Amino acid sequence: MSEAPNSTPDDLRREITRILGGKGMSSDFGHGADYRAFTPAAPDSRLRPAGRTATPAERGPFGRWLLMQAERGGLVGDLAKGAMADRGFPRDGDPEAVRKRLSMLQADGDMFEALDEAELDWFAL
């Protein structure tokens, strides 16, 4: 659709509403919008109900939590296994202390990505 030089935002809104009201099918352009087709998705049973997250004192140190993730698959599990093998790993440290340790050891980018993922999981506790 090419915009006419004198089009106003109202003209564009009308055109978009006309197209979307027909759900993109040319035969439906003349019909009004039927919003009954747009129903919300069923709730995801994997998501826990909204509520507060634990305080840092309730969660415990990030380093110790990370060490308990060794059985987990993926990069976070690999990071935890590497942390278990590292004598200088900051067991009582926060995510920044672990990030410093990874920088000092010149870890690859995947480990930093795993650390970011683990940090989000830890904060979500």
Image (cartoon, rainbow, N blue to C red):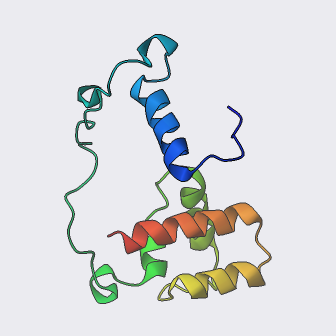
Q: 5 or 58, which lies in front? A: 5
Residue 65: quarter of image: bottom left
Residue 54 vertical position relative to residue 31 in the rendered view, above or below: below
Q: 96 or 19, which lies in front? A: 19
Q: Position of residue 84 (x, y in %)?
A: 56, 71
Residue 122 vertical position relative to residue 61 in the rendered view, above or below: above
- Residue 67 seen from this side: no
Residue 70 vertical position relative to residue 10 in the rendered view, above or below: below
> What is the residue that sits farthest to the right in this orientation?
106
Q: 118 or 18, which lies in front? A: 18
> What is the residue that sits farthest to the front in this orientation?
6
Q: Position of residue 41 (x, y in %)?
A: 27, 36
Residue 61: quarter of image: bottom left
Where, quadrant-wise, is the N terminus in this rendering?
top right
Q: 52 or 58, which lies in front? A: 52
Question: At 49% across and 48% down in the image, what residue appears?
Answer: 10
Where, quadrant-wise, is the C terminus in this rendering?
bottom left
Question: At 44% across and 19% down in the image, what residue appears?
Answer: 29
Residue 91 vertical position relative to residue 41 in the rendered view, above or below: below
